[in-house]
Image (cartoon, grey):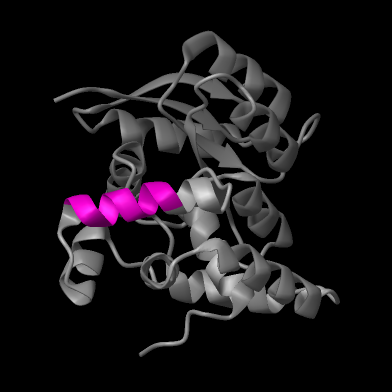
Amino acid sequence: MSTIRLVVVDDDDLVRTGLRLILGGAPDLEVVAEAADGRQAVEAVRRTSPDVVLMDIRMPVLDGLAATQQVLALPKPPQVIILTTVDTDEMVLEALRLGACGFLLKSTRPDRLVEAVRAVAAGEPMLSPSVTAQLIARVRDEDGDTRRRAALERMEVLTDREREVAVAIGRGWSNAEIAERLFMSVPTVKAHVSRLLTKLDVDNRTQVALLVHDAGLTAAD
């Protein structure tokens, strides 16, 4: 079992201590650094090259949004999970658009936190479609219609099958679920996902999901 290296970022000492104890208790997780603000976070990532960063969104010196942007601009960047106390924070949505792979409430159960870190490190989706849709709906700005048109235009480059896979990602389906429901093999699904990332010029599945939500294409069957 390979060890997943983590950096924990939060301006609250107690929160960092709690996260370190929870995550460090798992045999396959190792907290290699901590940071109390965004600037420290960027330096810690440069120094330790972690696999996953748990990033608080509201911090002094440099907030989590700016820190996420700088971390993801580094060579071979880690996966970034946003930590927040409110699931409808506009800054969280912006961090997801920048490339963060998902977000967790600080009240998340310890076992769910560990599972989420493992899933993200393995490249699996870690985004609740219902929460994401709610988040987008609550913080949608006045140019929502413009954003929807722009998202639909970006998706015009996709084939019908690729569009189906994109919508499935927007609904939070795993590769196995997509394969079963769309009658494909898992390797074929993975190939479609890779093409989606290239064609849509995005970095991860979360950004695909957000684009699908912006386009208004996530209604249930």
Image point 19% across, 28% down: which residue? 27
**Secondary structure mostly taken by the magenta-highlighted segment of the chain:** helix
Name the spot of residue 112 as percent of width and height, x first.
31, 54
Res 177 visible: yes
Q: Residue at x 18, y 65 (%)?
A: 184
Q: Quarter of the image for the N terminus: give it.
A: top left
Specify the quadrant that holds the C terminus. bottom left
Q: Position of residue 23 (x, y in %)?
A: 33, 34
Q: Residue furthest bottom?
A: 221
User: Which residue is nearer to you in this view: 198 or 178?
Assistant: 198
- Residue 36 in sight from this viewpoint: no
In percent of the image, x 21 and y 76: which residue is there?
A: 181
From this view, report whether residue 207 is shown above or below residue 156.
above
Point out residue 209 in the picture as x, y percentages from the top left corner. 50, 63
Residues shaded magenta: 187-195
Based on the picture, tell me whether residue 147 belongs to the magenta stretch.
no
| Left or right: 133 in relation to 65 | left
Counting the numbered discs, the total is 0
Q: Does residue 145 lie above or below 169 as drawn?
A: below
Give left or right: position of 14 versus 177. right
Q: Is residue 86 above or below residue 116?
A: below
